[in-house]
Amino acid sequence: MSGGCVMNEKKVVLVLSKDGIWEDKTDEILECLFAPNGVRIHIRFKSNPEKIFPYSQERVRQLEDPITTHNPAEVQLRVRGKILLGVESITKYVDFYLVTSHGKRRPYNVSDVDVERNIAVDPACKTALDYFRSITEVVGVQNNEDQSLLSKQFGFLSQVSDASVLAKYLTPDAALKALESPEVLIYPFGTNVSQKVAVEKAFQSQVVLVQGPPGTGKTQTILNVIANAIRLGQTVAVVSNNNAATQNVAEKLEKHGLGFLLAPLGRRANKDLFIERQSAYPDWIYQPRNEGSSLCELEAHLKLLTISLDRLIQANNERAMLVGKISQTRAEFELHKRLQETKPSEMAFSLSRKLSAHDLLNLLVEVEEVDWRVQINFFRLVKEIFIYGIRGRKRRRQLFSEGAMVLRSLYYQTYLSELQEQLSQVESVLNENNFLTVQQEVQETSWKLLREIVAKRFCHQAERTKFTSRELWSKYDTFLKEYPVVFSTTHSIKTSLSPDCLYDLIILDESSQVDVATGTLALSCAKRAVIVGDEKQLPNVISSNIKQRTLDVWNKYDLSCQAWNYANQSLLSSAKAMWPQAPNVLLKEHYRCHPKIAGFFNQKFYDNQLIVMTKDEGESDVMQVIFTPLGNHARVRINQRQAEVIQQEIQPDLLRKGVTDVGVIAPYRDQVAMLKQTLGSEVEVDTVHGFQGREKQAIIMSTVDNEIGEFVDDPQMLNVAVSRAQRSFTVIMSNERDNFDTNFGDLVRYIRYQNQLVKHSEVRSVFDLLYKDYAEVRKQFLDDHGRTSEWDSESLAEAVVKHVLAKPDFSKMSLSCMRHAPLAWLIGDASKLNEREREFARHPWAHVDLLVYDTIGKLPILGVEVDGWKFHRPGTIQSERDKVKNTVLKHIDLSLVRLSTTGSNEEVVIENALREIVHSGVPRTKVTVESN
């Protein structure tokens, strides 16, 4: 024998046991001898020095020259998901960690070990944690010993792993970890464009924010994330501020045969119930399966299907957007036809060729910008004849002097035809490529792949391990292999299993209602987080007393990171502020509400970003507002008259229409109690908070108060109330003028506009769909004709107006600004104008430089004129025209502000004018539209 080595203090010898476990035999070995052929290693043990034991080289490792050592006070080791306790020393070698714990030395493969630093001892992190602990003493629910239950949970945060999301949250400058996304993801619960993006991001970034507006499939997204985590062998905690929110997710997983992987834990009663009801494996995991290449084949097939699906779900979204655009354009065109005086056919002969919608807009801009009386050059003449089909001076004169209204009608007709053609093309693509079939096949293949993997993981175990309550803490690593998905509340997740447990992923649902202290506790439990919620729905409610006390705590600690401020942040808003670089996915496709209902909260709260997938079947009275007569019906947060209207008028009408799934919402508990007594048990009655996350075919809302106050007018409560209604929404209000300066005022004007309750009046509604396209074409026209300075000067004034509209007094009022609004677009009933004024108002060049208008009810609010001193000084022709314009606008009751280019304090002038208009209530209630 040769190559012998005598053991010394620097050499460590590991031997692989027959059970496949590496053991440290250093202290037991006397000598290692390499056989001459180099194939085997001969070992003599101290216990039997005369005998040589042969080992293959694969079963022996000699460790020399350690790479580094770790201080157990600063780091902890997680071995295959479980924290090692009682660690006294840590030495790292090339392939192994040598760890001494409880007086015994043991080796661990480097691949099985995660080294985690405790960031709770860092001074800055410790200060932040101390702040949150102090907060929990103020806000936490007390137990029988007057100890805050939340504070008690915070007692387990003496160790905070640097691998946790909380470590990033407590270190604002730390970068989030990017992940290598799986090549193929599964969608067993179906998907769409934005849901698919959200699922992808959940496996690409350490933190993902998912904004889930009403009816956009937030639960479906969560289910797909969980399914992919199960498939990848990851552990998941699903939490919310209440059990009801997560129960819906659990029920859907159970329905599809995955209930045996779920552990609904949290508080002690839930744990006891779970321990009592532990289930066996389902029969389907033992059924014959395709072995070998089956998984690879399924993944390859799913990958191809997903590529096809990507293109088709984009097309499906395009179809929905086209349907919505057609509906909106048709509604605006109908309103335009009812208000116009000249029919398109009366002047259609002026154009000898059919123009596209874009060409008609170009021509409309030229009609309103060009003096037809000026001699035109050859190139313009050719353009008018061959592009626009204008032949003959008489026709040209008629078109340029009288044809603007006709061109707008032709534009609507042509644009609708073009949209309809685009819709037909998109529908052909979807039909020819079997969209619904592909969608279904992606789901089915996803289920096959998931079930195949789950069955393969468990099928070799005849009986399932049963756990005791104590083992939820002592054997949490083994428990998570059996139950990889744990459900809990945000308050209880830290102790659902051992506080040392670190899930691969935590999904925080309803995070806009989770406070930052409780959220901090939850973030300590996982390596990654998907934070789901909606900033536009109900927030975390904090009483004024608690808010002040938490602000006192905040001021005491003098922290610089505003994202931690308990009084001002929910977990969702805090995460958004903390991680602006994190993916923030808005779920856009809406499937719940009738398009007219969804249109309100989409426009009012979501900046028209939602894509409404439901269909308008032309139903009448989808949205209604009913006014109770003037009088003191509202007393002590009860309105008997509104209850009678619901019982005697609305409810019978819904029953005649076959609608029985009805919810009634009131802002106050007293009104809820009275409505329950009045309406009986057939109709569900509750506050807005009671309907959060729910839906009904019909929603009736009782506002109670004669004058809508700040509490009732809360935009988030209004958003939740309206978005509960699938097919019908009715609001009952007092007919008080002051109500119209509220969010409910926007709702009323929206309902009236949608119901086309329009009559001829002095001022017309604003056609903003037409205007948005018109403005782009006009800008190009000015650029092409060397008149860019006009656009730039308008832009400066527009910036001032928009700055005013963004101020707190006006920002909630759904006001916007359009530039160069043709005066003829605003004049409705011209009977009060004399001949000179009528001629001026209808002239294509007459316009208002800037027009502030109500985007919900389409009502003009304020005109703004920017007067250059040279052209508008007294005695000039332009100053005389200004007088006529002033008179015209006065006749139609549209307030006007004139700004001089040599003046100052423009913002103050505009702000004061708007404030006077809003406080007077006149423009926001003028009779442009009327209710039944």
Image (spheres, grey):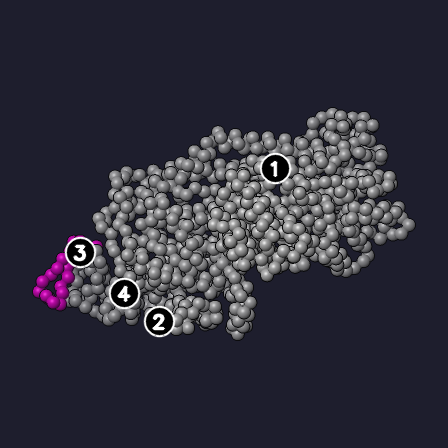
Residue 886 falls inside the magenta stretch: no
* Distance CA(mark 1)–CA(mark 3): 74 Å
Marks 3,4: beta carbons within 8 A: no
Q: Nearer the viewer, residue 520 or 97?
A: 520
Is residue 556 visible to us here? yes
Q: Which callout, 4 or 2, points to the residue nearer the camera?
A: 2
The boundaries of the magenta stretch are 36-60
Disc 1 crowd rating (10 Å Cα; few below 14, some 14-19, many 20+) is some
Q: Which mark is residue 18?
A: 3
Q: Which mark is residue 98?
A: 4
The amino acid type found where label 4 is placed reads Leu
Residue 100 falls in image quadrant: bottom left
Task: Give the percent coordinates (x, y) of residue 286.
Answer: 25, 43
First in sequence: mark 1 vs mark 2? 2
Q: Nearer the viewer, residue 77 or 361?
A: 361
First in sequence: mark 4 vs mark 1? 4
Q: Which callout, 4 or 1, points to the residue nearer the camera?
A: 1
Residue 293 drawn above or below residue 518: above
Task: Give the percent coordinates (x, y) of residue 84.
Answer: 30, 65
Q: Nearer the viewer, residue 87 or 25?
A: 87
Residue 652 drawn above or below residue 359: below
Q: Quadrant of the N terminus?
A: bottom left
Per the image, the residue denoted by label 2 is: 73
Disc 3 crowd rating (10 Å Cα; few below 14, some 14-19, many 20+) is few
Marks 1,2: beta carbons within 8 A: no
Task: Give the percent coordinates (x, y) of residue 761.
Answer: 75, 42
Residue 765 drawn above or below residue 207: above
* Distance CA(mark 3)–CA(mark 2): 34 Å
Which residue sits at x=34%, y=47%? 258
* Distance CA(mark 1)–CA(mark 2): 67 Å
Left or right of 354? Residue 445 is left
Per the image, the residue denoted by label 1 is: 327
